[in-house]
Amino acid sequence: VQLQASGGGLVQTGGSLRLSCVASGRTVSSYTMGWFRQAPGKEREFVAALFRSGGSSYYADSVKGRFTISRDNAKNTVYLQMNSLKPEDTAVYYCGIGSRIILSSIRSSSAYDYWGQGTQVTVSS
């Protein structure tokens, strides 16, 4: 399984970015897909996820209402649309895929089986 994340960059406060995560070797529609982020000196934290069963989406409180996770099954790609970005959103963003994640574990990075390489998002004040 390979996950290729892209779309990061430098943006001003209030700006937008769309991250993409292309999966090979797995069909994203059959798995739980998640976005996590890690800022320097901090642990990896949950951002958003799409549950495999029914495709319900879940968000960290810090991004709810600003970020949207979605997927394009034809392109086997998961997106993270990030609007109203803040300096505290600055981090390396990682996409993960999990085959046997239960709903209670969806916010735990240890529940995911594979990870992409990460893409840097920097929000300037």
Image: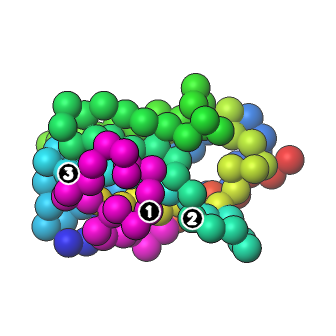
Q: How far is disc 1 from disc 2 in space, using C-alphas?
A: 7 Å
Q: How many marks?
A: 3
The answer, for residue 69, to whether it is visible in the render is yes
List the residue tagged with mark 3. 31
**Residue at the image point whose x is 54% and y is 35% from the top:** 67
Classify mark 1: residues with Cα within 10 Å, few (<14), some (14-19) or many (20+).
Answer: some
Q: Amino acid at mark 1?
A: Ser
Q: Nearer the viewer, residue 48 or 6?
A: 48
Residue 36 shown in magenta: no
Earlier-in-chain disc, 2 versus 3: 3
**Contact check, label 1 and label 2, Cβ < 8 Å:** yes
Q: Which label was assigned to residue 109?
A: 1
In the rendered image, residue 42, in percent from the top left (x then y), is placed at 69, 68
Q: Amino acid at mark 2?
A: Arg
Earlier-in-chain disc, 1 versus 2: 2
For the record, the magenta segment spans: 98-118
Classify mark 2: residues with Cα within 10 Å, few (<14), some (14-19) or many (20+).
Answer: some
Question: For numbered disc 2, what is the local secondary structure?
Answer: loop
- Determine whether, in the image, residue 107 is placed left or right of residue 24: right
Earlier-in-chain disc, 1 versus 3: 3
The N terminus sits in image quarter: bottom left
Q: How far is disc 1 from disc 3 in space, using C-alphas?
A: 15 Å
Q: Which label was assigned to residue 44?
A: 2
